[in-house]
Image (cartoon, grey):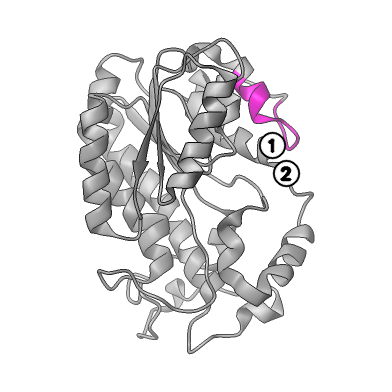
Amino acid sequence: MTSRTEFGHDTKATEVADAFPNQIKDRVGKAPVNNLKPHMLTVVHSAYHRRFQRRARCPSLLILVSRTKAKIDAVIEDIKAINPAVTAKAVLVDLSSQAAVRKAAEEIKALTPRIDLLINNAGMTVLKRSYSAEGIESQLAANHLGPFLLTNLLRDQLFEAAKHSAPGATRVVNVSSEGHRTSPFRFHDYNNEGWPIPAEEAGTTYQLPDWAKEPVDGYVGMQAYAQSKTANILFSVGLNKRLADKGVVSYALHPGAIFTEMSRGYGNKLNDINQFLSSLNPKPSNDEGSSTTLVAALDPALN
């Protein structure tokens, strides 16, 4: 239960940041460039960074992580324009590459001994099968295994932050999706290659539009995406079992059906996916879509 019962579908991230200024000030965070946070390490998305910097409360350090330098540079420039006092650092990483994730983790460790908030919000979705350098299905690699590995490599920084914070104030936020309902985690066929699986791992495609149910060379891209989002949720469950006694907690969330660049992998089906998203509940703006992540990261009632 959050502390703000008035928060709802139309709540903006700027409102959340204003509601919890003390949870932003002087903290360290990491985010994926798509969104952003306080003294946290966050794989940051551009949607979030304005929410933290707009008011007088300053995070101690923002570490922005993306595979695209131009995106990070644009976010940092925007941050500096809003609040020059904020220190923001950039780290480049392709989350689908475990070698790249390990390199990025070392760069992050060199920037800070502690991470108060870690937001895993990177995502991709495609219709055609592809694999990471390690032979992992690409959506599972980028959406789950990359953030999973990065979080584990940064656990000492999380533990250090927890020593100096109230229990539960140090957090790992995993941005999942309502789409997880389409597929459990396929433990017997996590690469979606057609291996026999028990009935409880089969999932269902009834929620998907007809065009998205059709396999491409035996691969249903949206179902593979759903599996990766289920993995995000299970990751939070596992983190809480293992780290709560050290003062670190994790939350997984659905941000809403927001139009982002994530769907560029749909190619000529992009209009179809946009129509599908528009048919769902009223889609939130980027500001509204960022608010749930910020509540999960900041609300002290969730400690």
Q: Nearer the viewer, residue 114 or 228?
A: 114
Residue 7 visible (yes or no): yes
Residue 44 placed where, x, y %? 47, 40
Locate residue 119: give its quadrant.
top left
Residue 230 placed where, x, y %? 46, 58
Q: Nearer the viewer, residue 155 or 54?
A: 54
Residue 69 placed where, x, y %? 43, 46
Residue displayed at 29% across by 21% down: 162
* Type of amino acid at the residue the image marks with label 2: Pro
Count residues near mark 1 (Cα–Cα under 10 Å), then give few for <14, some for 14-19, many for 20+.
Answer: many
Q: Secondary structure at mark 1?
A: helix
Compared to 272, does 163 lie above or below? above
Locate residue 265: give its quadrant.
bottom right
Residue 1 visible (yes or no): no
Residue displayed at 48% across by 82% down: 219
The answer to whether 175 appears left or right of 98 in the picture is: right
- Residue 288's disc is 1
Count residues near mark 2 (Cα–Cα under 10 Å), then give few for <14, some for 14-19, many for 20+.
Answer: some
* Type of amino acid at the residue the image marks with label 1: Glu
Residue corresponding to mark 2: 284
Q: Nearer the viewer, residue 258 or 208?
A: 258
Q: Which residues are magenta?
A: 7-17
Residue 168 placed where, x, y %? 38, 24
Quadrant showing the N terminus: top right
Compared to 280, does 218 lie above or below? below
Compared to 210, does 72 lie above or below? above
- CA gap, disc 1 and disc 2: 5 Å
Q: Secondary structure at mark 2?
A: loop
